[in-house]
Image: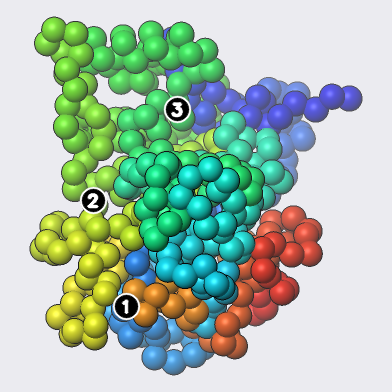
Amino acid sequence: MKTTPQFERRTFLRGLGASVALPFLESALPRSLWAAASPPAAPPLRMAFLFIPNGAHMPAWTPEMEGAITKLPTTLEPLAKLRDKVTVLSGLAQDTGWAHGDGAGDHARSAATFLTGVHPKKTDGKGIQAGISVDQLAAQHIGRETRFASLEVGCEDGKLAGSCDSGYSCAYSNNISWRSATEPAGKEVNPRQLFDRLFGGADREEQTQSRAKRDLERKSILDLVQQDARSLRRQLGKDDKQKLDEYLAGVREIEKRMDSAGDRLLVGDNLVRPKGVPKDFGKHAALMADLLVLAMQSDTTRVASWMFANEGSTRPYREIDIKDGHHPLSHHDNDPAKQAKIAKINRYHVEQLAYFLERLDAIPQGEGTLLDHTMVVYGGGIGDGNAHNHNNLPVLLAGGTAVGIQGGRHLLHPKDTPLMNLYLAMLHKAGVKIDAIGDSTGPLANL
């Protein structure tokens, strides 16, 4: 018998050009499926890969002792609420990030190899080549039954053409996700466009009509599906009604924040529409985090990658009183003042990670939370930005307790243990039985 992809069987609220996927609501199932739904199936496993550029100030990143974490280092202090669900992984390396005869270009190689473990071909034009990334490999296996096999997002736009780093194409510096060895996946940096993509209907003409109607009448996307929502709500039990109300409230809250975010565009003679890209990094990151959480909560996707900034980013962080560009600061020459600023940027990034993880952990799922059923990698492909080294990388793993990952620890691995070993272990926990990915030598032990 022909099977139907799961996203077609799920509950959607529909309206003109709108399709709002919902979290699992047991009482919304047809009566013929009630028996099959009890006991409920285990929640699906998700993966998210979060990337930070330009290395880190490792003394402020690394816990003092191996084993149980009793005190978080300064950079990681924002994770205090979730310390027991975070594992700091020291000693991991990305050997393919080194030059291997190709000369300068460590920043480009850092991003290109972070999820691929493949040394990129040095070219600033045609013929770019790296390797399929772990997120895309996961998407082929655990993302097939969702509306989007994977989502790729970022907080800094970047071109794909031209040279960005010592003869390496900008495609390398500005992407971590690769659909194939020659095709970077690209990323969405505009929260409004990501929102429209997640909640727009399949018909493009209707999507356009939907956006025009919402712009003209200043409506919420929920206004377009309210009739369907009222009909569904009458079928729900008490707990599912609360779950539905909380979920839709989250969607509306994001809309409100987008309406007040970023610059505005002239539409027609006098109507303005927000771009949806806040100038404030923290507000931008929070919107992207909330959208990814909604996408995972509703099982719209199970795999995501997120670049906090492009590799080699020169972005200043005026939100925390840092006017210097991030990349120039990373070349600190052991200047304590510059190192302190790098550590401050690192901590600011971890604050955004903490927000994302706490949002995931606030959503009940199965016998735990959404975070328990999500493996989140956070880190970068350069250790110390001044040294441009690709070993002793800043990497941590959060969540995943539902598949046996034990948090609250600092694991110190042998020197130059391949980072790809971590990803191989994650794939195995997700049921993807492959022997190797990139330059992996075997699944990382003791997770």
Real-space Cα separation, disc 2 to disc 3, in angstroms: 22 Å
| Quadrant assignment for the N terminus | top right
Against 109, residue 331 (above or below) is below
Real-space Cα separation, disc 3 to disc 1, in angstroms: 39 Å
Which residue carries the number 3 mark?
197
User: In the depicted view, which residue is nearer to us: 293 or 37?
Assistant: 293
Q: Which amino acid lies under the numbered mark 3 shown in the image of this protein?
A: Arg
Rendered image quadrant of residue 30: top right
Residue 306 appears in view: no
Mark 1: which secondary structure? Answer: loop
Q: Earlier in the sequence, mark 2 or mark 1?
A: 2
Which residue carries the number 1 mark?
386
Asked if disc 3 and disc 1 are in contact, CB closer than 8 Å, the reply is no
Residue 444 appears in view: yes
Q: Which amino acid lies under the numbered mark 1 shown in the image of this protein?
A: Asn
Q: Check disc 1: other Cα within 10 Å, few if <14, some if 14-19, many if 20+.
A: many
Residue 96, x across and y down, in percent: 57, 69
Which residue carries the number 2 mark?
281
At a point 24% along the width and 29% down the height, the residue shown is 275
